[in-house]
């Protein structure tokens, strides 16, 4: 056990931000709120594709980030549901699949499903 362990729910928003940051690293700038929203919607989609047999609603996904701002949560909802964002969302999904470490994606996605099931 490490000297200091951050509870998963508190650290998840940091992991979420780090994953989005790693995916966007090639752009050489910090992720904007817009990019974080697109990235959040993309992460939700990627996790759903990795585990189509498991169910995790968008609201459950958002609720697993208790420190996420209301604005970011609303933006993720918009990017996930509005057809006008489809191309940008698909581009981020492709980037996430190719630029993010797949093992990290697997760990993050598994933690979402495990924690959502634990809240039932």
Image (cartoon, rainbow, N blue to C red):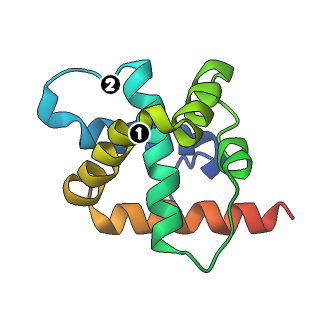
User: Hey, which quadrant is residue 56 in on the image?
Assistant: bottom right
Write down the residue under mark 2: 31
The vertical placement of 70 against 18, above or below, is above
Q: CA distance from mark 1 to mark 2?
A: 9 Å
- Badge 1: residue crowd in 10 Å (few <14, some 14–19, many ≥20): many
Q: Is residue 14 visible?
A: no
The reply to whether the C-beta atoms of the residues labelled 1 and 2 are less than 8 Å apart is yes
Q: Nearer the viewer, residue 116 or 93?
A: 93
The vertical placement of 85 against 102, above or below, is above
Q: Nearer the viewer, residue 18 or 74?
A: 74
The vertical placement of 91 against 106, above or below, is above
Instruction: State the image coordinates of residue 65 (x, y, percent, origin top left).
Output: 65, 40
User: Hey, which quadrant is residue 77 in on the image?
Assistant: top right
Say left or right for 24 vs 48. left
Instruction: State the image coordinates of residue 58 (x, y, percent, origin top left).
Output: 66, 49
Write down the residue under mark 1: 39
Q: Which mark is residue 68?
A: none
User: Hey, which quadrant is residue 76 in on the image?
Assistant: top right
In the picture as drawn, the residue positioned furthest to the front comes out as: 83
Say left or right for 79 vs 30. right
Residue name at image x 28 percent, y 44 percent: 91
Residue name at image x 56 percent, y 49 percent: 5
The vertical placement of 94 against 15, above or below, is below
């Amino acid at each position: 056990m490490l000297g200091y362990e951050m509870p998963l729910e508190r650290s998840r928003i940091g992991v979420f931000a780090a994953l989005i940051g790693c995916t966007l690293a090639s752009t050489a700038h910090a992720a904007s709120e817009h990019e974080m929203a697109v990235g959040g919607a993309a992460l939700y989609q990627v996790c759903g594709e990795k585990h189509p047999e498991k169910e995790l609603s968008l609201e459950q996904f958002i609720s697993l980030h208790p420190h996420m701002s209301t604005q970011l949560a609303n933006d993720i909802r918009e990017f996930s549901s509005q057809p006008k964002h489809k191309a940008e969302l698909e581009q981020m999904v492709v980037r996430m699949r190719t630029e993010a470490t797949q093992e990290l994606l697997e760990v993050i996605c598994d933690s979402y499903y495990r924690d959502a099931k634990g809240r039932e």
